[in-house]
Image (spheres, rainbow, N blue to C red):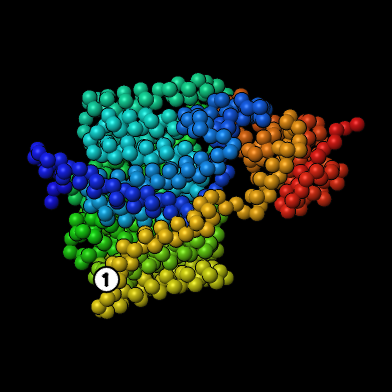
Amino acid sequence: MRLVDATNGPGGQIRAALGRLSWTAPLLFCIVAAVCATFLSGINFPEQNNRWQIPVVLDFAGSADGPHDTYTKSFANFISLFWIGVRSFTDERNIQTVFVAIQLAGNALLASAIFTFIRKAGQPVWPTAFVTGFLSFAYGLWGATALGYSEIFVTYATHTQYAIALSLFGLVRIMTGRPYLAGAMLGVAANINLFIAVWSACAAGLALIATQRRIATREQFGFSAAFLLIAAPVTVWGLAAGKDSGAIPVSFFHEFLAGHIYALDYPQALVQCFALLLSAALAIRSAVPGDPGQRLAVVMLACTAVLGVAATMPYIVEIPLLLLLHPLRFTSVPILLAAVGAGVLFIAAGTDRVEDDARSGLALFAAALALAGFVLKMPVVSVFGFALAVPTRHRRTRGVALSLSVACTLAVLLPAPPMEMTAKAALAFFLMCAILAAVALLRPKGAPFHLRLVAAALGLVAIAPLSSWVGVTGVCAVAAGALLLFFQPRWHAVGSIVAAAGAILALWTIRHDVVGVALIMSGSAIVLLVPAMRAISFARPLARAGLIALVPLMSAAGFANGVRHDFAPNPTEQQRDFREAQDWARVHTAIDAQFLPIGVEDGFSLFSRRTVWWEESQGAAVLWRPSFLPIWSSRKAALQAASTPEEIVALARREGVSFLIVPSTEVTKFESATPSYSNAHFAIIGLKSRP
């Protein structure tokens, strides 16, 4: 039934208005879910990148309170009109409220972008809202990406998230054939975060060319003109600020920004990320019929191709100005598109609008695997689901997707930052299993026992640290078991047995984590045993009701957590003590006093408003003022050379440092100095000048 009457007259106008209103409630549902998910995850201030944003917003260098050192003055070149705009209505009295509001609004905007993308891919409005709400709570989409350390849903205020959301809106407009508006949105994104917008604009341009199958069309010129015109102010500013970027040695990028630039330093994340992106695009292209689905696949492939160029560029050319574009920070955009693809697959399969051949409803369970897999930090389950979603008649595509799934699983064995088993990860595994069990109850023929067993085994591989030989053997066994499911049915039982053996080995490696093992065993039991209850009359209605109630229940839990913490940051005792130490320094020390943190976190100047002689995070100033590099590097070398407390004190006195900030447990090591202030976690040691 058409929502909008194409005829003229009052009736047609009313129907048009109702058609527009039909978006309002579902979109509001998504926004509420994203905000409640933020409360559930937690609000933090100040956190991480806020170290570089607060000095801009409060204009430290231009204020009477300072600090006024070289590092603080470098923020005149910090390129983001976003924070300059925030400065116009922010002061020290309301800065926490403003930053919390920015965090909440950013997550809500990102959820709105996901909702719009899935909706424009041809999916019904309310199912789109529920899937978007679920993705807002997906643990795997919270925090930094494993490749590129880029933001998705965030636990602190950041302008980058707004640029990512606007980039998604721009890519939606490319998909729906409105390139001029896409260029304008990406131009606005550039004024918020230039490097996210540049890579997104490249992806949008490539998608536009692929869609039109021509080069140098009027639409392409219009898109480019709109983007360049709106992005011109921040681009000119960036080029002026980076005119000395050639003075930055490549070694600095390796030392300070490797996570944002050099993909080969993170082989596990590199393989798993591209396996996820490619398998998602292949599944959408082969399984979702209709023009909207095919356009979505084109946009996904364009973003993947641009990310591939971004990942290889630093190894081909070593031009500092290009490295300053943080190529891997773009990773969050294609990963979000993969999540969008999983949502599209799930909705389309649930409404029987995917190619499913004669596989008795496997499409829905495969899509559920792809979607539910995003609750885990590793995309092992999602890639397996995308591979299963490729129809059997697409033999080559299915073979490629299968290879990607195996590679993604085995990539668990590649070098990566240390991972520990956490209760949150185990809880995410339990949630995934509960969702898969509900879907299996709805369409039991598409979710046979051997498939559910392998899915649970893959989920375990994704959350358990498996560095020992037992864990390695378990990973290989699970990968082999998953592989056998793509062969003839006679191999399915063998595959499930092999995967079960691998899962037992993986479980053995975390046997000392009682809570984690209990959650994993409970989740596995649910997904393996609950579908056997399908003969009970109320089982399927209960499963359907559970899936529908999932997002409202999690939203209620998030809201309750927000109430519990007064919808405000809930700092740890250590964070409170750190803030108290800063407040003491601001009241009791001279405005020109210098501090040197030893063995404590960065960010002491944020509320003390006092100069910090050296912190690791100050190296970021080199990106917007390259002339700061000699100061930062020489001070770092001097501090590294001071290996004893006596040498540190001597260095501090020589450089005119007034106070040291050290952990309270380390005070006794500085026998020649006098503590001026201390609390349970930190001490401030006053340094007397040499006689």
Left/right of residue 89 with respect to residue 656 in the rendered view:
left
Q: Residue furthest right?
A: 691
Q: Nearer the viewer, residue 377 or 343?
A: 343
Q: Quadrant of the C terminus?
A: top right
The amino acid on which the numbered mark 1 sits, given as a three-letter code, is: Pro
Q: Nearer the viewer, residue 381 or 616?
A: 616
Left/right of residue 103 with respect to residue 172 in the rendered view:
right
Q: Identify the residue at image location x=28%, y=31%.
A: 181
Is there any visible trace of residue 380 in the rendered image?
no
Can you say whether 301 is above or below 522 in the image?
above
Q: Identify the residue at image location x=66%, y=52%.
A: 574
Q: Identify the residue at image location x=31%, y=23%.
A: 225
How many circles with numbers are drawn on the protein? 1
Which image quarter: residue 367?
A: bottom left
Q: Residue furthest front?
A: 10
Rendered location of residue 351, percent (x, y):
21, 59
Residue receiving disc 1 = 541
Rendered location of residue 148, percent (x, y):
47, 43
- Per the image, label 1 sits on a secondary structure element best described as helix
Left/right of residue 46 with respect to residue 218 in the rendered view:
right
Rendered location of residue 236, percent (x, y):
45, 21
Can you say whether 137 is above or below 361 in the image?
above
Rendered location of residue 503, percent (x, y):
44, 69
Which image quarter: residue 5?
A: top left
Left/right of residue 554 with respect to residue 46 in the rendered view:
left
Q: Identify the residue at image location x=41%, y=58%.
A: 555
Q: Nearer the viewer, residue 473 or 114?
A: 114
Can you say whether 489 is above or below 561 in the image?
below
* Badge 1: residue crowd in 10 Å (few <14, some 14–19, many ≥20): few
Q: Nearer the viewer, residue 645 or 430?
A: 430
Is there any visible trace of residue 110 in the rendered image?
yes
